[in-house]
Image (cartoon, rainbow, N blue to C red):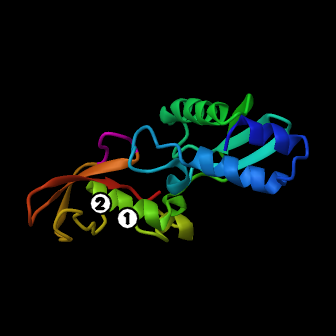
Amino acid sequence: MNGDVVTSSAAGGGVTTTALEDELRRLAGSVPDPELPVLTLEELGVLRGLQVLGPGRVEVELTPTYTGCPAIESMSEDIERVLHEHGVPDVTVRTVLSPPWTTDAISAEGRRKLEEYGIAPPRPGGPASAGGPVMVELSVRCPHCGSTDTTLLSRFSSTACKALRRCESCREPFDHFKEL
């Protein structure tokens, strides 16, 4: 897709707004997460929406993984850059806090990629999705050997979204993306 498609679409050149929004959402969603570059914003589930507001005008909605997430600014800039490169001159990225993001928003492909990258993914349908309390101690499977004999070393790792654990079987440390 190039700038001509955006211009001709907005001028009624045969591409529907829905098809244009779908393509622009695909582009915005393909941006890698700045803290977990193995995942796209779509796979992480932080891209909430995209609307074409008019010719060359797009609004994107992002929900951070937690309020005050320092990566939201970088995500916004990356989305703006990608959409500008594809012919959208006026891009607004809006932060949406409600409903809050939970780890249930991570796609199955995102969970697979996290594990492949060496990060234990959060379990789908965790405590947050049931509206219950978030457990402090979980039986977390080691992404290296598959053992559930793991120990929590620190509730926080390289980001606030992850905890640092060690596998007692293979002795390897690993990050666990906490269930939120």
Q: Is residue 124 visible?
A: yes
**Residue at x 82% of width, y 52% of height:** 15
Closest to the observer: 60 or 97?
A: 60
Closest to the observer: 157 or 83?
A: 83
> In the rendered image, which residue does mark 2 sit on?
116
Q: In the rendered view, does 7 fall on the left or right side of 43? A: right
Closest to the observer: 61 or 30?
A: 30
Q: In the rendered view, does 61 fall on the left or right side of 35? A: right
Q: In the rendered view, does 143 fall on the left or right side of 70? A: left
Q: Could you tell me residue 76's position as x and y percent?
A: 59, 33
Q: In the rendered view, does 71 fall on the left or right side of 121? A: right
Task: Identify the amino acid type marked 2.
Answer: Glu
The answer to if 70 sits in the magenta stretch is: no
Q: Could you tell me residue 65's position as x and y percent?
A: 51, 46
Neighbourhood count class around disc 1 (C-alpha, 10 Å): few under 14, some 14–19, many 20 upward: some
Which image quadrant is residue 5 in?
top right
Q: Could you tell me residue 128's position as x and y percent?
A: 52, 63
**Label 1 element class:** helix
Mark 2 to mark 1: distance in Å? 6 Å
Which image quadrant is residue 115 in?
bottom left
Would you say the magenta stretch is mainly helix, strand or loop? loop
Residue 112, label in figure: 1
Q: Could you tell me residue 6's position as x and y percent?
A: 77, 40
- Residue 123 sits above or below residue 56 on the image: below
**Residue at x 87% of width, y 47% of height:** 13
Task: Identify the amino acid type marked 1.
Answer: Arg
- Residue 94 sits above or below residue 127 on the image: above
Residue 120, label in figure: none
- Residue 150 sits above or below residue 45 on the image: below
**Residue at x 84% of width, y 41% of height:** 8
Answer yes or no: do the residues labelled 2 and 1 have beta carbons within 8 Å? Answer: yes
Q: Give the magenta range.
A: 155-160
